[in-house]
Image (spheres, rainbow, N blue to C red):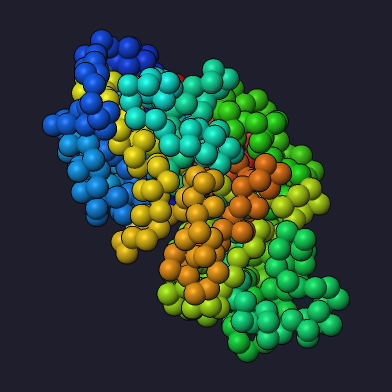
Amino acid sequence: MHTHLGRPLPRRRFFALAGVTAGTLLSSCAAPRTPVPAATGGDPWRRFAGAEINVISENTAPTAAIAADLAPFTQLTGVKVNIVSLELQALVQRVALDMAGGQAQYDVIYADPYQVLAPYHDGLADLREFIDDRTYPPLEGGLGDFVPTQLAAAGSFGDGGQVYALPYDAPTMVWQYRADLFAKYRSRMEAELGFDPTPGPERTWEEYRKIAEWFNGVDDVPYGTGHQAKQHDSLMCDFSNVLWSYGGDYFENGQELGLKGSTTPGRCLLREPAAVEAAEFYRSLVSIAHPGSLGWDWDGVGTALRAGQIAMAPNWHEYAASNESVLPGKVEYAPLPRGPHRSANIYGGTGIGISANSSGARRGAAWLFVNWATSPGTQLSNLKSKVGGGTPTRNSLYELPEAKAAMHRPSALPNMLTATAVGAAWEAERIGLRPKIPMWNECDTALFTELSRMLAGQQTAKDAMNRAADRIDRIVARGWAA
């Protein structure tokens, strides 16, 4: 995902970007390392006092909040933390080079599931090493406190049971709409459209399109809907919601592939009738949307909604704080509409993990940071931050009285206004998961390139899906190599 959401994805393979081979990386990851100093008793949080660690992260909301206030961690542990915050493409390049060198310039790594975790999981430590070791401070609430679908999608790869990362951020696409306009026109819309227009997963995508066309005819906003249909990763994200809702997918067992990951996903399914039907509907939807949609990514859509250019849009839920600051009380949130198959809401979250090459006191101190940064207390502090934010990945935080109160206006924590919508979106039957495969970036580019040609009128929906599938099959057939 992202701006502060962390989703502008690079378009090259990681090993090619870094100029390394898989063999080089794997042999480097196996290099000997200095053991973590043994525990000597006392406060386990102070075990590595005096150590200094380096953290590399995408420039996301949680990282901005933590970087602005590291004092609580330093006071708790005595560990100095240096945070490098980058655009995702630059982060992936640095991580690739660091791992290939067999060193650990970066101890804690923002492990994007598609750009770091899938290709580089062998270069990440299995966090069970720390979770199961009673000489470390316990993981508050245990692994069971994380949203299950997020823990699997952001933290695992394969069937080995390893935990490579803990969920750190959780941007998810939901239906964002001008509640004031829906309230103003609800009765009239229901009478003229013949159905209850109230947003939610009971609405269909066909009804969403009819609502959008209806708003095109009133004066309150220029257009009913806007979309992130730029030739960019955002186009894949926006289309995927429709694809899954129509029963289409990229590969067989798509949900399992998104949770567990694989290096051999098999044949692409975009040629199937459900995918073609989804593409044809998406083309028709964008055709009646704000014309700026063809040049917008998620930031463009968010800006358009806040500027009063559109009445509704699918977008990442973490724009809630910005929406509330510009349109206080006027924007509400719901799961996305359903298609013939289901309601699908793409998940764009990421976890943080530890470099397998990190060693000595730095390795232990890195775990203290990962433990602390994903703890309920830190996530609550992030919600309150004036420079960051993010959304909790811990179930227990949503049960806190302070968090529950913030789910309703007036809200001191405006991102919590989306809690009901994203909670529903994270359920197993609604969450939308991209294929967690090492070559996904190339597949993503193939898809949004063909979709963009379709939206420009250069090819039909069927041709777009066939050509995307052909390109994806060739990418997958090459396997994962530099």
- Tell me which corner region of the image, top left, top right, bottom left or bottom right, holds residue 360: top left
Label total for image: 0
Return the residue nearer the eye: 198 or 237.
198
Task: Identify the residue shown where x is 35% and y is 36%.
Answer: 370
Task: Identify the residue shown where x is 31% and y is 54%.
Answer: 65
Task: Identify the residue shown where x is 52% and y is 65%.
Answer: 405
Return the residue nearer the eye: 277 or 181.
181
Q: Residue furthest bottom?
A: 219
Q: Quadrant of the C terminus?
A: top left
Q: Residue furthest left?
A: 50
- Tell me which corner region of the image, top left, top right, bottom left or bottom right, holds residue 11: top left
Return the residue nearer the eye: 63 or 339.
63
Q: Is residue 217 above or below residue 342?
A: below
Task: Identify the residue shown where x is 30% and y is 36%.
Answer: 369
- Is residue 478 something that shows in the picture? no
- Is residue 361 something that shows in the picture? yes
Q: Is residue 160 above or below residue 193?
A: above
Q: Is residue 391 above or below residue 47?
A: below
Counting from the top left corner in percent of width and height, residue 390 is at 42, 54
Counting from the top left corner in percent of width and height, residue 252 is at 70, 31
Counting from the top left corner in percent of width and height, residue 31 is at 27, 11
Q: Residue furthest front?
A: 42
Counting from the top left corner in percent of width and height, residue 310 is at 58, 76
- Horizontal side of residue 280 vs 316, given as left or right: right
